[in-house]
Amino acid sequence: QALMAIKALRGDLERTKSGQQEQREGLRMTNSNLQALSDEIAKANTVSGMIDQRLTEAYTSLKSTRQNLAETNTVALRIHEDHKNTKAQLAATREGVKKCAIRVKQVHESLENTIT
């Protein structure tokens, strides 16, 4: 009977050792999977940081471009206004030149009449 009990205990011991070994293998696999997952998360965080930096740079560039566009728009409006004023002055100058030409013609005619 004692031998039977010892055999039973040895069988239980072997099953326990086998179960422990399976659990160790499972834990190793789990640890390996966790490490791989941790590595993937670290890579994702790195990529996320790079994307965040690029977005910040793009935002800064866009802000600068908007400012430059606003300044360019102001200059374009000023040039447009100057052009309008120049056209008005040119029209007035042409009118003055026409009047001068008519007056010069009258003076010439008057001189011609006086000479003859």
Image (tube, grey):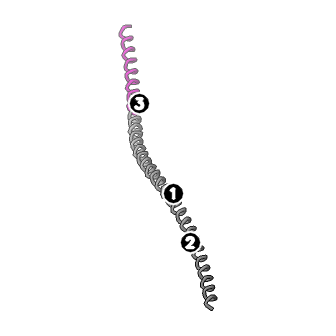
Quickly name the residue at label 2. Answer: 24
- In percent of width and height, residue 10 lies at 61, 82
Quickly name the residue at label 1. Answer: 43
Residue 89 magenta-highlighted? yes
Determine whether, in the image, residue 83 is placed left or right of residue 39. left
Q: CA distance from mark 3 to mark 1?
A: 71 Å
Q: Earlier in the sequence, mark 2 or mark 1?
A: 2
Residue type, numbered disc 3: Ala
Q: Earlier in the sequence, mark 3 or mark 2?
A: 2
Find the residue positioned furthest to the top. 116
Q: CA distance from mark 2 to mark 1?
A: 28 Å
Which mark is on residue 27?
none
Quickly name the residue at label 3. Answer: 91
Residue 112 magenta-highlighted? yes
Vertical placement of 8 versus 60: above or below?
below
Residue type, numbered disc 1: Lys
Q: Nearer the viewer, residue 97 or 21?
A: 21
Q: Main secondary structure of the magenta part?
A: helix
Determine the residue positioned at 41% across, 34% down.
Answer: 83
